[in-house]
């Protein structure tokens, strides 16, 4: 317990980096996932094919490889740079890879929600002259989001936990990297490990309860 108290400030700073990665990842993956689901249900074959390929490839690729590709392939080889500061650049590289990975799961959750919307509603939208984009944004997606609040919550919780592998993308300031550094320095493990477990539970459990409550509160009655 003494080690946990001694290194609490360093661990808290590392955990805060995980929180920031989570916040960026939630916003970016929801946006990209919504675009992907629009592509997957689009009447245009090319867009459907592109969305399907992206989702299937990303979902079947380990996150560590996605992050490594973002850092080594896009950043080191292709010169994609977000900032001249290495720590800031690695943060955004990891955030990009994490968002790209999570968006595939967001897309599939939303597509399941789209499938719950009766086909007659889309046909009625076309009958009154709405375009595909108009019917998608005004009729289909609002109902789809309401139908999959709980699954989306699970995806977000998984993404928060996935921030602990940020070191695969070269980001060495997160909680997991800080914990490893403390372990290597002191040899103490159990109190620090349990402290971070509690910290992540304090972050993920409320999300689970909130999304479960919202799912029941906003459920679409068929």
Image (cartoon, rainbow, N blue to C red):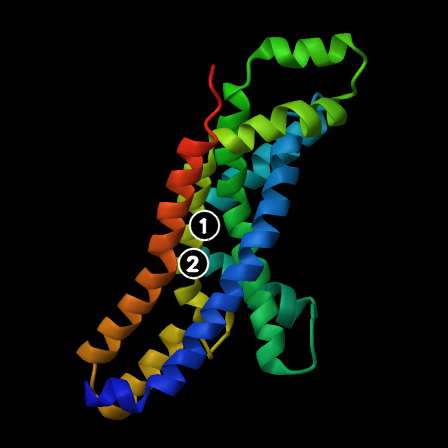
Question: Could you say whether the residue bearing mark 1 is in a helix, strand or loop?
Answer: helix
Residue 68 showing in the rendered view: no
Task: Name the residue located 69 percent from the left edge and 27 percent from the top edge.
Answer: 138
Question: Quick one: label 2, few (<14), some, or many (20+) residues within 10 Å?
Answer: many
Q: Position of residue 145 (x, y in %)?
A: 54, 33
Asked if residue 193 can be seen in this view, the reply is yes
Q: Is residue 55 above or below residue 134?
A: below
Left or right, residue 75 beside residue 94: right
Give the number of the disc on residue 156: 1
Q: Quadrant of the N terminus?
A: bottom left
Residues at marks 1 and 2 touching, judged by CB atoms closer than 8 Å: yes
When the figure is inspected, residue 39 is found, relative to residue 15, above or below; the finding is: above
Residue at image location 41% in from the left, 65% down from the top: 165
Decide which of 174, 139 is in the foreground and name it: 139
> Which residue lies at the image location 38% right of the left edge and 40% below the top edge?
212
| Mark 1 surroundings within 10 Å by alpha-carbon count, few (fewer than 14), some (14 through 19), many (20 or more) | many
The numbered disc on residue 19 is none
Disc 1 from disc 2: Cα separation: 6 Å
Task: Give the percent coordinates (x, y) of residue 23.
Answer: 54, 60
Residue at 20% of width from left, 85% of height from top?
A: 188
Secondary structure at numbered mark 2 = helix
Locate residue 6, reporting x and y percent: 29, 91
Marker count (numbered): 2
Place residue 216 in its image quadrant.
top left
Which residue in the structure is indicated by mark 2?
Answer: 160
As drawn, which residue projects farthest toward the right?
Answer: 129
Most extreme residue toward the front, as rendered? Answer: 217
């Amino acid at each position: 317990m003494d080690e946990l108290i001694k290194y609490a400030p360093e661990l808290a700073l590392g955990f805060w980096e995980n929180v920031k990665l989570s916040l960026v990842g939630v916003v970016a993956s929801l946006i990209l996932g919504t675009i992907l689901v629009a592509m997957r249900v689009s009447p245009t074959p090319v867009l459907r094919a592109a969305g399907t390929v992206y989702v299937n490839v990303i979902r079947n690729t380990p996150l560590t490889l996605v992050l490594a590709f973002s850092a080594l392939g896009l950043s080191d080889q292709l010169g994609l740079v977000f900032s001249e500061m290495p720590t800031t650049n690695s943060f955004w590289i990891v955030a990009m890879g994490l968002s790209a990975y999570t968006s595939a799961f967001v897309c599939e959750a939303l597509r399941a929600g789209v499938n719950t919307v009766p086909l007659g509603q889309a046909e009625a939208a076309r009958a009154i002259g709405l375009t595909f984009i108009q019917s998608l944004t005004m009729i289909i997606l609002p109902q789809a989001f309401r139908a999959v609040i709980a699954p989306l919550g699970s995806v977000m919780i998984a993404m928060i936990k996935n921030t602990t592998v940020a070191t695969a993308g070269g980001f060495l300031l997160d909680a997991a990297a800080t914990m490893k550094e403390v372990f290597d320095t002191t040899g103490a493990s159990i109190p620090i490990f349990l402290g971070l477990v509690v910290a992540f539970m304090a972050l993920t459990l409320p999300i689970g309860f909130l999304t479960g409550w919202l799912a029941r509160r906003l459920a679409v009655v068929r």
